[in-house]
Amino acid sequence: MMMLKFYAKADQLVTVPGSRPVVGQPPKYIGRSFDRDSLAFPATEEGFTCESESDRGRRLTKLTRRDSSLWAANGKTAAHCGVPFVQLEFADGVWVRQSRRHRPKKTE
C-alpha cells in the first residue's frame, strides 16, 4: 500500500469521497479549504493524501484517470493513476503547470 497525494485543479470541485454533509457546515473538497470572507474554496498548498487501497484512494484514482479531475502531486501518484506526471507550481492560489522559466535545465 502506498500514500497518494492530489492537488485541486483550478476549475474542479471534487468532493472528499465518503464525506457527509453537515447542516450549517461547508462541503469538503479535495485540496481546497473554505474561505469565509470570500465564500469560496481556494486551493491549498498541502493537497490531499490518502492510501491507495482505501475507498478514497480507489475513487480518486478513478477520477484522476478517467476524468482528469485532479492533479497527481508526485510521480508515484501519477504512475498509480496511469496518467503522465506534470510538474506543477502553486501560483495565485491555484495549482498550474510549472512555467518554463522555473523548470530545471536538462543536461545531456
Image: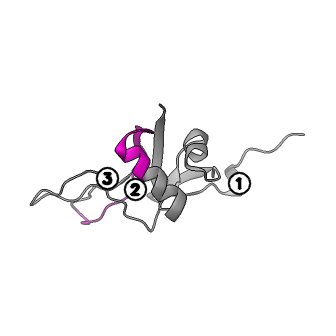
The tag earlier along the polypeptide, 3 or 2, is: 3
SS class, disc 3: loop
Q: Where residue 87 appears, x then y in whole percent?
A: 63, 50
The tag earlier along the polypeptide, 2 or 1, is: 2
Could you tell me which residue is drawn at 53 percent across and 46 percent down?
73
Q: Which quadrant holds the C terminus?
A: top right
Residue 24 seen in the figure: yes
Mark 1 = which residue? 101
**Of residues 102 and 25, which is closer to you in this image?**
25
Badge 1 crowding class, 10 Å Cα cut-off, few under 14, some 14 to 19, many 20 or more, is few
Q: Amino acid at mark 3?
A: Val
Labels in figure, total: 3
Left or right of 57? Residue 96 is: right
Residue 43 is tagged as 2
Question: Distance between the Cα atoms at labels 2 and 1?
Answer: 23 Å
Residue 16 is tagged as 3
Nearer the observer: mark 3 or 2; the answer is 3
CB atoms at circles 3 and 2 under 8 Å apart? no
Badge 3 crowding class, 10 Å Cα cut-off, few under 14, some 14 to 19, many 20 or more, is some
SS class, disc 2: loop
Q: Amino acid at mark 2?
A: Ala
In the rendered image, the residue lying farthest to the left is 23
Q: Main secondary structure of the magenta part?
A: loop
Magenta region: 37-59
Q: Amino acid at mark 1?
A: Arg
In the rendered image, the residue lying farthest to the right is 108
Q: Where residue 60 appears, x then y in whole percent?
A: 43, 52
Question: Distance between the Cα atoms at labels 3 and 2?
Answer: 14 Å
